[in-house]
Amino acid sequence: MILKTIVAGSLGANCYILGCESSKEAIIIDPGGDYQKIIACLDKQGLQPKIIVNTHGHIDHIGANDKFNLPIYIHELDAEYLTDPVKNLSALFGPPYISPAASRLLKDGDKIELGEISLEVIHTPGHSPGGICLKTDDIIFTGDILFCGGIGRTDFPAASEKEIIKSIKEKILILNDQAIIYPGHGPCSTVGKERRENPFL
């Protein structure tokens, strides 16, 4: 699998490009902005994007959804965030933004498959009601649930500190210590490191 990280948008969200080495098809996770940088990365790798997956519906993770004319996957509980500038927080941080509507509504346990890539959807509410992580082998994309040394904000509407801690402990910390965490912001980490050192846990 080809894996590239692009720090995108004014809030510095991590956009991930997952490419299948055999089919040269790609999944874009959380295109929050700077779509030219994303396109340049795709072109450099010789990849053809086929799907956008949003780990949740906040503006810094959906802000370039409209630039690619691709199917958009998001958890069913965050689907309204795509088209509601109040819920997606764009009305709070800048110009109101409306993304294209979801093409597929995800649920816990769903599989997203493209070429030889297979992602398991893990519902992890707390930062938003429909927050998800995406797992493939010993890699997990945690969105704004778990960061290196931190957790997602819980001071937004519909967020919950109790829920986010529950999600992390029951859905992420059950993985082996070597599992690599690719978060929505900041550097990557491992499950073992966060279990031992994360002050919020």
Image (cartoon, grey):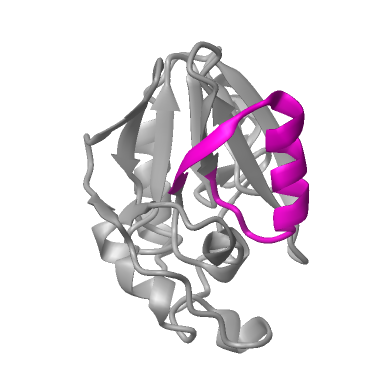
Foreground: 199 or 40?
A: 40
Q: Quadrant of residue 6?
A: top right
Residue pictured at 70% horizontal, 45% vertical: 39
Q: Position of residue 101 (x, y in %)?
A: 35, 68
Q: Is residue 99 above or below residue 191?
A: below
Residue pictured at 68% horizontal, 35% vertical: 42
Q: Is residue 48 left or right of residue 171?
A: right
Residue pictured at 68% horizontal, 41% vertical: 149
Foreground: 189 or 19?
A: 19
Q: Position of residue 125 (x, y in %)?
A: 35, 55
Residue pictured at 40% horizontal, 64% vertical: 128
In the image, is residue 36 part of the stretch drawn in magenta? yes
Q: Is residue 38 left or right of residue 48?
A: right
Q: Is residue 126 above or below residue 120?
A: below
- Quadrant into which the N terminus falls: top right
- Which residues are the magenta region? 29-52
Q: Is residue 4 above or below residue 10?
A: above
Q: Position of residue 61 (x, y in %)?
A: 57, 59
Q: How many marks?
A: 0
From where the camera sits, is residue 153 visible? no
Q: Is residue 148 left or right of residue 195?
A: right
From where the camera sits, is residue 28 visible? yes
In the image, is residue 39 part of the stretch drawn in magenta? yes
Q: Position of residue 103 (x, y in %)?
A: 30, 57
Q: Quadrant of residue 80?
A: bottom left
Q: Is residue 38 left or right of residue 191?
A: right
